[in-house]
């Protein structure tokens, strides 16, 4: 397809959606880019001609929005940067119109919805593009492939504030609603090679990375489809994803979520009041090991705010947006399958880190 014929549609003009738009625009790629949301345009970096205001009549979890159909129709592909509870709504429009679909979600409700369709032919569909799940899955799978008899794969990711003085030792750099959902959902794992789920906030451990000690515990969504893809492939394999926090955070959230059993809506209100920061750090650590003492490979990179193509971005903004932009470029250059459901673990680490923005995940020798 000629560059001038490519029309990218981004739905959701919040922090990550607008970051994807701006990074894509900054490359001079020549694509037509449209971005839609149900609010009036408020971001000065979005061109007026590129903005489309949606009129959502039924913003429900399982509703049907003809307004999505109007925006989706005629696009080369759709990027979903909406809150997770709108995934099914938007995907319905892409499914009906045969438009390729990408999203950033950690939530697995869309996967279950796609299974329920029982359709032999779905448009190109690639959920879970971002940091975790997303590039963390790609690097972990790359580490795993050279281990002859793997016994363990660990993915540890933390989006942390560089400084914090509250008792949680944490300021938010993304959605309070998403954080609560992560702390509540079922967590996918492999135990002795078999797929299982465990409760969020369990599996507490301490880990030292780059000379600093952190705590880690199970949270939902970080593996995407990775655990199910690996189910039964390696008899002894343990695979899990845990969130990194500073020591002491877990005790407080475990008290709120499990001891007090506070309702989700109240928890969302509480976590939405935690101060936000743009001085963040994203830690991505993954390891794969086998039976032998020397049979281990690992990856560690710490991302901090930086300027990219003239815009100052937080670590969580650009690591998340670049995860999706990487997959989009691989699709447009035909480096990944062009139809059906495509998983993060289907992607080559070499290909991913050879893209325009994916190179930011490389570890320089």
Image (cartoon, rainbow, N blue to C red):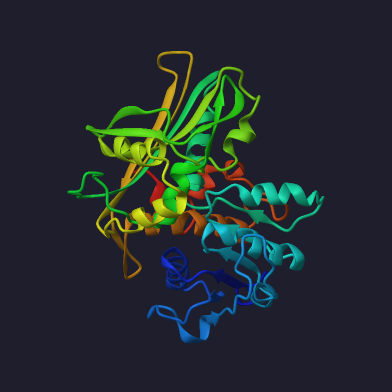
Q: Relative to residue 159, is residue 334 drawn left or right?
A: right
Residue at the spot 62% in from the left edge and 57% down from the top edge: 331
Q: Position of residue 165 (x, y in %)?
A: 17, 49
Residue at the spot 32% in from the left edge and 36% down from the top edge: 250
Residue 300 makes an appearance in the image: no
Q: Quick one: quadrant of the C terminus?
A: top left
Q: Quadrant of residue 230?
A: top right
Q: Quadrant of residue 255?
A: top left
Residue toward you, 123 or 218: 218
Residue at the spot 41% in from the left edge and 50% down from the top edge: 179
Residue 89 makes an appearance in the image: yes
In the displayed image of the protein, which residue is found farthest to the left? 165
In the displayed image of the protein, which residue is found farthest to the top? 292
Residue toward you, 210 or 365: 210
Q: Relative to residue 206, is residue 265 drawn left or right?
A: right
Disc tally is: 0
Q: Position of residue 46 (x, y in %)?
A: 44, 79
Q: Position of residue 43 (x, y in %)?
A: 39, 78
Q: Quick one: quadrant of the N terminus?
A: bottom right
Query: 228 above or below 316?
Result: above
In the displayed image of the protein, which residue is found farthest to the bottom? 49
Query: 293 above or below 254?
Result: above
Residue toward you, 239 or 301: 239
Q: Position of residue 55 (x, y in %)?
A: 59, 79
Q: Relative to residue 249, is residue 182 drawn left or right?
A: right
Q: Relative to residue 293, is residue 104 drawn left or right?
A: right
């Amino acid at each position: 397809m000629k560059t001038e014929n490519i029309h990218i549609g981004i739905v959701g003009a919040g922090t990550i959606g607008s970051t994807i738009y701006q990074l894509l625009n900054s490359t001079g790629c020549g694509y037509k880019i449209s971005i839609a949301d149900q609010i009036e345009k408020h971001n000065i970096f979005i061109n007026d001609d590129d903005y489309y205001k949606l009129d959502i009549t039924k913003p429900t979890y399982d509703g049907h929005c003809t307004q999505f159909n109007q925006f989706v129709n005629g696009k080369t592909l759709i990027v979903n940067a909406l809150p997770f509870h709108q995934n099914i709504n938007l995907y319905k429009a892409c499914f009906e119109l045969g438009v390729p679909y990408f999203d950033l979600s950690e939530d697995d409700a869309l996967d279950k919805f796609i299974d329920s369709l029982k359709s032999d032919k779905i448009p190109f569909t690639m959920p879970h593009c971002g940091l975790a799940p997303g590039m963390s899955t790609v690097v972990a799978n790359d580490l795993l492939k050279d281990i002859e008899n793997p016994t363990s794969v660990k993915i540890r990711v933390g989006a942390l504030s560089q400084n914090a003085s509250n008792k949680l030792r944490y300021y938010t750099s993304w959605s309070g609603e998403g954080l609560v959902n992560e702390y509540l959902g079922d967590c996918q794992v492999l135990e002795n090679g078999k797929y299982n789920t465990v409760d969020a906030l369990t599996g507490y451990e301490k880990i030292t990375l780059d000379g600093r000690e952190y705590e880690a515990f199970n949270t939902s969504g970080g593996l995407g489809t990775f655990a199910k893809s690996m189910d039964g492939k390696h008899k002894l394999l343990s695979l899990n994803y845990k969130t990194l926090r500073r020591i002491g955070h877990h005790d407080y959230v475990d008290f709120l979520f499990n001891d007090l059993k506070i309702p989700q809506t109240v928890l969302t209100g509480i976590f939405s009041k935690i101060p936000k920061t743009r001085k963040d750090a994203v830690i991505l650590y993954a390891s794969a090991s086998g039976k032998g003492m020397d049979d281990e490979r690992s990856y560690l990179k710490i991302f901090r705010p930086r300027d990219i193509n003239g815009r100052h971005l937080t670590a969580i903004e650009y690591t998340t947006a670049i995860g999706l932009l990487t997959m989009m470029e691989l699709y447009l250059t035909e480096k990944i399958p062009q139809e059906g459901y495509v998983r993060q673990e289907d992607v080559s680490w070499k290909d991913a880190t050879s893209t325009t923005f994916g190179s930011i995940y490389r570890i320089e020798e």
